[in-house]
Amino acid sequence: MNIGICGAGVMGRGIALACVQTGHTVILCDAIPEVLEQAQQWVRSQLDKALEKGRLTAEQRSAASDRLHASTNLTSLSTSDLVVEAVVEKLDVKTDVLVRVESIIRSDAILATNTSSISIAALGRQLSDASRFVGLHFFNPAHIMKLVEVIKGPRTSNATIQACMTFATGLGKTPVVARDVPGFIVNRVARNYYNEAQRIVMEGAATIDQVDMSMKGLGFKMGPFELMDLIGVSTNLDVTTSQWQQFYLEPRFQPSLLQKQMVDAGQNFTDQ
Ligand code: NAD
């Protein structure tokens, strides 16, 4: 398939890698040329690692690399069968991109969003055909994590859901259909992992290191603070804020001042 991806940040580049490795052609778009350049270099370096580890042959590596294209111009998405929007977690930015992409792609192409928390209903509101609009929520790192949430908005057709389940399975993923509720499945559960960890630190009950070490000692692959750093402290705060607002300011989802301060200072939790 021809896959378009809007946003070449942490997620866009990971989704691009997952796609080129499984035979799809990708056009990766971003507003910033330097980001696109870095994203292409990153995908190629990951393909090189796969070659070194014997997971790809030299021919497979070079074919996958040839399938990756990049552009700062959304009109390059006109031939896409499926476009995944992976720009910043802001309703206004995403809506603008989605409306512009819809005006460019074929009428039978699928339009998906990788949003972590924003309602599919709200994101699809200004689209003229939301039956082909769907949430396709990959997890970080997108080329490694198996789970993909396929989120059905109020107007998403069953054919669109089925096509996304088939696409995700073909990427070697484990797709699960989720309802369009704030945080869907995983982020609803995970918010408590991040928020409660921050409350413990703010109360002075334990340090960031102690919390991370404890959770890893229990069997979690990463502690909550390491995980927020991997996700991006700012992106993670956007998701928490969005979910809290959608739950009408429910206290258990309230973002923490500690995280806000980290974002303001441009710091990671584990830098300290
Ligand atoms: P990011 O900040 O790393 O990347 C976003 C990219 O979008 C940037 O490169 C930026 O230049 C680009 N962009 C912004 N506005 C644009 C526009 N108008 N046109 C084209 N490009 C534009 O963010 P990310 O972490 O990759 O997150 C992207 C989406 O994926 C968000 O919705 C986020 O919630 C979701 N998500 C993130 C994670 C994670 O762990 N980071 C996991 C799952 C889902």
Image (tube, grey):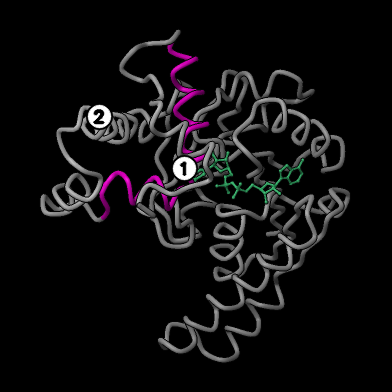
Q: What residue range appears in magenta?
A: 222-247
The tag on residue 243 is: none
Amino acid type, residue under disc 2 in the picture: Glu
Q: Are marks 2 and 1 in contact (CB under 8 Å)?
A: no
Residue at the image point whose x is 26% and y is 49% from the top: 223
Left or right of 262: which side holds 101?
Answer: right
Where residue 239 sits in the image (x, y, percent)?
A: 49, 31
Q: Residues within 10 Å of mark 2 (few under 14, many from 20)?
A: some
Residue 15 among those drawn in magenta: no
Quadrant containing the N terminus is bottom right
Tell me which label, 2 or 1, sits earlier in the chain.
Answer: 2
Q: Nearer the viewer, residue 29 or 156?
A: 29
Left or right of 43: which side holds 37?
Answer: right
Q: Quadrant of ligand 1?
A: top right
The image quarter in which residue 135 lies: top right
The image quarter in which residue 25 lies: bottom right
Residue 232 among those drawn in magenta: yes
Amino acid type, residue under disc 1 in the picture: Val
Where residue 181 sits in the image (x, y, percent)?
A: 45, 20
- Residue occupied by mark 2: 196
Residue at the image point whose x is 72% and y is 32% from the top: 93
Residue at the image point whose x is 56% and y is 54% from the top: 10
Label tally: 2
Where residue 267 sits in the image (x, y, percent)?
A: 47, 47
- Residue occupied by mark 1: 233
